[in-house]
Amino acid sequence: MRMIALLAMVLSFNVLAVEFSHTDFGNDGFSRHYYSCDFAEAALEGHLEALGATQIDVSCSGGIESWGVFPVTLQARFDLPNATRENHTRATALRLKASSRFNEACFFHTKLLNKLLKVTSNVEVNSRSAHCVDNRSRWSYSVTVFE
């Protein structure tokens, strides 16, 4: 029994609990874009899973509603591996990019990822190509995820 308690305590130090908040007003240059909460939640969850997050809890308010259109506000709580380039057991090269799964919403994804990558200490950005001319523009981030 003591071994299980000790193992649980050691494992709890190997993750960081993170709270994240992001609001997208949809103002992008000369364009205005609207998103549903379903789309925004799925996009954030997909990025978090790819970046090694666990215990993901995402909520959303605003977006496209039957009574109007509002800014999309995302709230998330999740755990990340407590790992860095200097202190990790595994590293995975990964490319996050526009695809039919993410509906290519260039402005939304690049703003979300730029903010999200600032709070993910277990991720190192190797390169990014995110020049949104319109919402259908291609974007990609090459990252290394440490675990």
Image (cartoon, grey):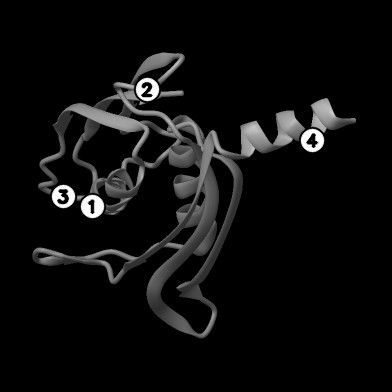
**Residue pointed to by mark 3:** 134
Residue 142 coordinates in the image, percent (x, y): 25, 24
- Please give the label number shown on residue 107: 1
- Please give the label number shown on residue 50: none
**Residue pointed to by mark 4:** 5
**Residue pointed to by mark 2:** 87
Is disc 4 surrounded by few (<14), some (14 to 19) or many (20+) residues within 10 Å?
few
129 is higher (above) or lower (below) than 75: above
> Marks 2 and 1: which is nearer the front?
2
Which badge, 3 or 1, comes first in the chain's sequence?
A: 1
Cα distance in 3D space between marks 4 and 1: 46 Å
Residue 144 coordinates in the image, percent (x, y): 31, 22
**Helix, strand or loop at mark 4:** helix
**Helix, strand or loop at mark 3:** loop
> Circles 2 and 1: CB distance less than 8 Å?
no
User: In percent of the image, x 79 and y 35: which residue is there?
Assistant: 5
Q: Residue furthest right?
A: 1
Which badge, 2 or 1, comes first in the chain's sequence?
A: 2
Q: Residue furthest bottom?
A: 67
Q: Amino acid at mark 3?
A: Asp
